[in-house]
Amino acid sequence: MFALRELVHAYDGREVLRVPEWRAAQGAHWLVLGPSGSGKTTLLHILAGILRPTSGSVGIAGQDLAALKPAALDRFRGEHIGIVLQRLHLMPSLTVMNNLLLAQYLSGLPRDGARVREVLTTLDISGKADAYPHELSFGQAQRVAVARAVVNRPKLLLADEPTSNLDDARCEQAYELLDSQARACGATLVIATHDQRIRARMSNRFELRGRP
């Protein structure tokens, strides 16, 4: 599903990430482990096409991301990749429904209200379709962020520290939410975390070491 080869990323000349090789099959579930500062977020941003690596290749669903110009890369990301960031980044001026419709629009896909309602129902938040982000609890907002990530049926679902600062019950709920939605889409799931509580839940692990 994706393949990374000789991947290096540096900021201001200082190497912050090195991945000699990593391949993942379609539908596989992977946990990216490592301490703070080891490059987990950077790696996810590179997989999402948000960052261009300093060197090396990134192939997603057979597409070399380096070959895509910015507008084409944005469309590819919208169609094939869903991402749940540490900060949920919901548009505060838009309702839940319109946040998801915007995700479809920005991907160049037809706005499909029926698909939005289907996802919201699956995540048990259909009653919040007309609510604004400030009217949601944290758990509801997290579900909306997941709904936005999967509304376009991505082939790759990425989540950055989705259980940090959550108690044990909410940690379990967050993991189950991502797992179930990835399976519903047949997506490859990659969760980056330093949270040891979900380590036993995923057998495929890619571990990053802290940089000196």
Image: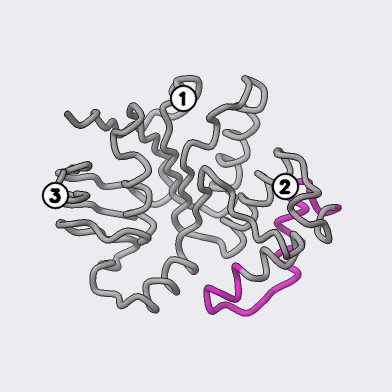
Q: Is residue 168 magenta?
A: no
Provide the residue span drawn in magenta. Answer: 103-127
Q: In the depicted view, which residue is nearer to us: 105 or 116?
A: 105
Give the left or right position of residue 97, taking residue 207 as reference.
Answer: right
Residue at point 16%, 44% (across, down)? 14
Give the left or right position of residue 204, taking residue 201 as reference.
Answer: left
Horizontal and vertical percent position of residue 187: 48, 52
Q: First in sequence: mark 3 or mark 2?
A: 3
**Residue neighbourhood size for the residue with mark 2, other residues' Cα within 10 Å, grouped as few (<14), some (14–19), many (≥20):** some
Does 54 appear above or below 160?
below
Q: First in sequence: mark 1 or mark 2?
A: 2
Horizontal and vertical percent position of residue 129: 81, 59
Residue at point 71%, 39% (across, down)? 138
Q: Check residue 13 in the rendering and tell me which mark sits there, or answer none.
A: 3
Residue at point 48%, 44% (across, down)? 159
Quarter the C terminus occupies: top left
Horizontal and vertical percent position of residue 162: 53, 37
Identity, as a three-letter code, of the amino acid under mark 3:
Gly
Q: In the depicted view, which residue is nearer to us: 36 or 174?
A: 36
> For residue 49, which quarter of the picture?
bottom left
Q: Indicate which label's residue lies in the foreground, 1 or 2.
A: 1
Q: CA distance from mark 3 to mark 1?
A: 30 Å
Q: CA distance from mark 3 to mark 2?
A: 43 Å
Q: Check residue 195 in the rendering and tell me which mark sits there, or answer none.
A: 1
Q: In the depicted view, which residue is nearer to us: 73 or 86?
A: 86
Q: Is residue 126 magenta?
A: yes
